[in-house]
Image (tube, rainbow, N blue to C red):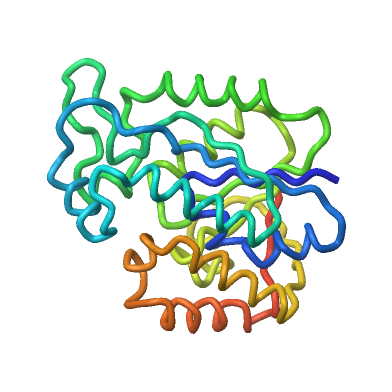
Amino acid sequence: MKWIYLSPHFDDAAFSCGGLIWEQVNSGEEVAVWTICAGEIPPGPLSPYAESLHKRWGTDLNAVSVRKNENALSNQRMGAATRNFMIPDAIYRRSLSSGTHMYDSDAALFSEINLGESSLVDVLGQELLQYLPQVCELVCPLTLGGHVDHRLVRTAAEQSARRMWYYADFPYSVDPEQDLIEQGGEMISTPFHISKAGLGIWEESMAAHASQISTFWSGTDQMRDAIRSYWGKEKGIRLWQFV
């Protein structure tokens, strides 16, 4: 069976599902990670917000190439194939009418999709339909945490009318069952076991995204503690489907 994980950014599939992806590959499944917001930085000045993120990441204007290389290493560790789409990260996107940055703060980034991007949702939905094989297991973020790019990916993927699996957006959510109760929606979950070997690969696939560790943790040791604690609740993770 072919599994396709839709990853809004270079790190999302690895952070949320790295151990499961390796287990599936190790059992003979074909797995690919499709990173949606993998496009180059558009011409023009960055917002102060984007500049501050580059400074924290230690990437400057090489952010996309650095993160692509990190993603390639992470996917190699998991054994997953790579496909990168051309949409820029939300922190780089501008209004077509005014030219202003649409997502220039944490508040804007963790919000609803800007009304000016309705056509972007449609374009991505059509692109996914173009590339998706007739038969595959499609896995999409639940959007727990509310990041606008996660919303973009889920909304576009649901336009395909495919029956999909959904993964919890770690580390935005560490208690997905409770978060889903608060979010609402009739969904059922299926547990997937991840071995200690799979946990080790999960940690290494996350560590490959070195520029992004500081977004959530003080360093790789704290990251490893966090993922071990998350894994330890069920020795694996769950994927969700609508009833």
Residue 36: x and y, percent? 51, 37
Q: Is residue 195 left or right of residue 93?
A: right
User: Which residue is depicted at the point 67% across and 47% down?
Assistant: 139
Q: Is residue 221 left or right of residue 188?
A: left
Of 201 and 106, nearer the camera is: 201
In this view, the residue in front, 125 or 79, is 79
In the displayed structure, 215 sits above or below 45; it is: below
Q: Residue at x 81, y 63 (%)?
A: 26
Q: Is residue 212 above or below residue 158?
A: below
Query: As rendered, which of 175 and 18 lies closer to the eye?
Result: 18
Which quadrant of the structure image shows residue 62? Answer: top left
Residue name at image x 59 percent, y 22 percent: 127
Task: Give the number of callouts.
Answer: 0
- Horizontal and vertical percent for residue 211? 36, 60
Image vertical order of residue 38 relative to residue 161, above or below: below
Does residue 8 appear to the left or right of 205 in the view shown?
A: left
Say which residue appears at 61% left-offset and 54% top-offset. Answer: 75
Q: Where's residue 182, x and y in %? A: 48, 61
Q: Is residue 232 above or below residue 135?
A: below
Q: Position of residue 138 (x, y in %)?
A: 71, 42
